[in-house]
Amino acid sequence: MKQYRTFLLLLLISTVSATMIRANSILIPMDDQQSNHLKAYGIAYKILKDDQEIDWLLNYRGGSFMMKQTAAIETECRVRGVSFETISDARAASIRQQLANPDLNMDVVTLHKAAKIVVYSPIKVGPAEFENTDAVLLVLTYAEIPYELVYDEEILKGDLPKYDWLHLHHEDFTGQYGRNIHRQSLADIKAQEDIAHKYGFTKVSQMKLAVAKGIKEFCSGGGYLFAMCSAAETLDIALAAEGLDIVGSSYDGDDVDADAQSKLDFTKTFAFGNFTLETDNGYRGYSTFSDINSSGGRSYNQSTGFFQLFNFSAKWDVIPAMLTQNHEPIIKEFFGQTTAFRKGAVKPSSLVMGESESSDRYLYGEMGRGQWTFYGGHDPEGTRGGGFRSPTDLNLHPHSPGYRLILNNVLFPSARKKKRKT
């Protein structure tokens, strides 16, 4: 009988102990122990979309995620091939306490709600095959993060306020159809002309300016803007050239304003000033848009160097700290029509988050009540073959630090707690 009572006592103690250390939290590490960094962001987004909160552990194991444990989350991680650890609430509290230490450059940011994502792309109105290499479309699809598409007409109709986060990529807001390597087909050009005529514009350049101003208004009103490649450059060019003709006769049938350069208004732009426009090299001829692009005529060469992310204070510079979370601070350079940004063309009001010796690569700023990020280059893992770019297979690059920067921006809006309707 005594042995039986001893057995029951030990059983009770072990049961209580197991309850006390039961795994009630999930940690998704984002250091070298993570089996798929990119899909981990998809897990985080899904949890937010299911109205659950996530702790983003800044500078802890590569910017890890921590959330309440559920069987559904564990299953989702296993299905998507994402590494995770089940930990006790006591361990989770210990991590939070560790990150609160004022002597450590770490902190916890709670993510509240999934941003509603929209991508501005000509695939909304036509085949636009070149857009198959849009890095953001590729990584959103790979990470299984849902998004919608808009193009010029939706912006002209005022649809952008329906969304939280807008992406622009390989676009030309000056109305010169890209100016390079036959990127846009005649069908793509006609689609833009048809929208312009439908809304009463005599030139595509006039319509694109109206679209650029609509994007600026979206951001000023509290939206989040993420632009890459030529979209970042041409958006600011179009805004600075409002009311001026900077489009050559080969595109719109009349000459440019000879004094356009001296009339540019840099107060209207997001990130750039003190830039010089490039002259027109002829319809569908190769050309850069301005000297904002630090790479100039070598835009589509293969990568030859690296750029470095800045180390921001997680407690005092929370926004750039979120946007630079990574398991690697040194990132391979990648090229595009607008590869990187000339340092002298970047406004002092723009925060540089990543740079090489010769150029700025990754910028952040505020516009009204909104925020924006500009990221130079076309595809962080892109290569060329047969004279044209091919879509990147992200199954071959699940740990890409260059693509992680894109996904940091996708989660960034979730750090703002939205007001509840009453």
Image: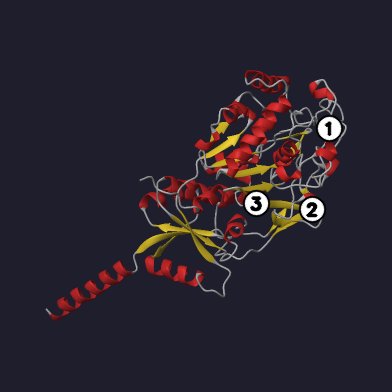
Location of mark 1 (residue): 286
| Pair 2/3: label in front | 3
Q: Position of residue 370 (x, y in %)?
A: 58, 47
Q: Amino acid at mark 2?
A: Lys
Pinpoint residue 210: horizontal percent, then vertical percent: 66, 31
Asked whether, in this view, residue 197 is left or right of residue 54, the answer is right
The amino acid type found where label 3 is placed reads Gly
Query: Residue 155 at what x, y percent from top left?
Result: 59, 31
Precedes in sequence: disc 3 or disc 1: 1
Name which residue lies at 74% across and 52% down. Answer: 347
Based on the displayed image, in which of its 4 quarters is residue 284 positioned? Answer: top right
Mark 3 vs mark 1, foreground winner is 3
Q: Which residue is mark 3?
A: 365
Quadrant the N terminus occupies: bottom left
Quadrant hosting residue 3: bottom left
Q: CA distance from mark 3 to mark 1?
A: 31 Å
Q: SS class of the residue under badge 3?
A: strand
Q: Position of residue 243 (x, y in %)?
A: 75, 32
**At x 51% / y 41%, what residue is drawn?**
144
Task: Classify 358 as above or below 302.
Answer: below
Query: Which mark is in front, 2 or 1?
Result: 2
* Label 3 crowd bin: few (<14), some (14–19), many (20+), radius 10 Å: some
Q: CA distance from mark 2 to mark 3?
A: 15 Å
Vertical arrangement, residue 114 with respect to residue 190, above or below? below
Q: Which residue is mark 2?
A: 343
